[in-house]
Amino acid sequence: MKIKLSRHPRWTFVAYASVAMVSAGISAHLNAQSPQPPAVTVDQQNIVLEGTVDLYLMNPDGQVDGILLNSNTIVRFPPHLSEQLIKTVSPRDSVKIDGFTESTNTIHAGTITNLRTADSITDTPPGPGRLPPTPNLNRQRLSVSGTIRLVTHAPRGEPDGVVLTDGTIVHFPPLAGQDYSNLLQPGRPLAATGFGTVNSYGKSLEATTLACSGSQPQTVPTVAPPLQARP
């Protein structure tokens, strides 16, 4: 498109303004045809509740990183406070949770209080200069099967693990959870292999294969393979 500009200053200004308006209109049209992805928000709400501890939740490195209440409510807590949490509450203890909703049926606790002993533990960051935890080099190869008791979720709501009825915890990336979301339902069978830990607090593994509802085992997509896993 060619626009002839007048030598008169006033008409020159009008011509340039017209070009700007046309450009703006084209840009708006293109933007309308290319919608932007919606922003992801997490509705976090403060919450206080009471319940009874059913079992410890544990990560594949063997650190207790929360508790499961008998109401199937998941209570998350930082793994660097694992030892203090174990000393404060035990299965069958009545507890009070003060925290905020993190995802589906999941609470991140700011404070956990044992109603029997009145002892409590508060979420605090690691001390200054403390190095981040190193990967557990003693993860062992595990193979588990059972019935899904409940599905755990990442902060954005994607499935990222399950708790079986025998208390075994199976972890997997949210990407895999999205692929199996229709099959990951309470009451359905699940089998998994992977690498993790078995100790007095439970059994937990990071899955490398999953077989949901009797399907053939499928390889779980992972960001990185387990480090120095023991055969």
Image (spheres, helix red, strand yellow):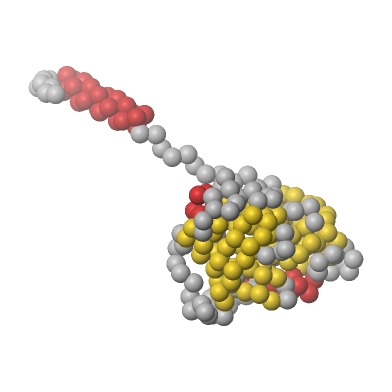
Residue 156 can be seen, yes or no: no
Q: Nearer the viewer, residue 138 or 26?
A: 138
Percent of width and height locating residue 89: 80, 68
Q: Quadrant of the N terminus?
A: top left
Percent of width and height locating residue 187: 69, 50
Q: Which residue shows up at 68% across the image and 56% down it?
A: 147
Q: Which residue shows up at 84% across the image and 69% down it?
A: 119
- Quarter of the rendering containing residue 52: bottom right
Q: Is residue 143 above or below residue 73?
A: below
Counting the numbered discs, the total is: 0
- Quarter of the rendering containing residue 133: bottom right
Percent of width and height locating residue 229: 51, 77
Q: Which residue shows up at 72% across the image and 72% down it?
A: 201
- Quarter of the rendering containing residue 92: bottom right
Percent of width and height locating residue 42: 59, 46
Q: Is residue 131 above or below residue 35?
A: below
Q: Is residue 16 above or below residue 172?
A: above
Q: Which residue shows up at 85% across the image and 65% down it?
A: 93
Q: Report whether 47 appears left or right of 29.
A: right
Q: Report whether 209 appears left or right of 54.
A: left
Q: Report whether 43 appears left or right of 225.
A: right
Q: Nearer the viewer, residue 226 or 67?
A: 226
Q: Which residue ends up furthest to the right in the rendered image? A: 116
Residue 196 can be seen, yes or no: yes
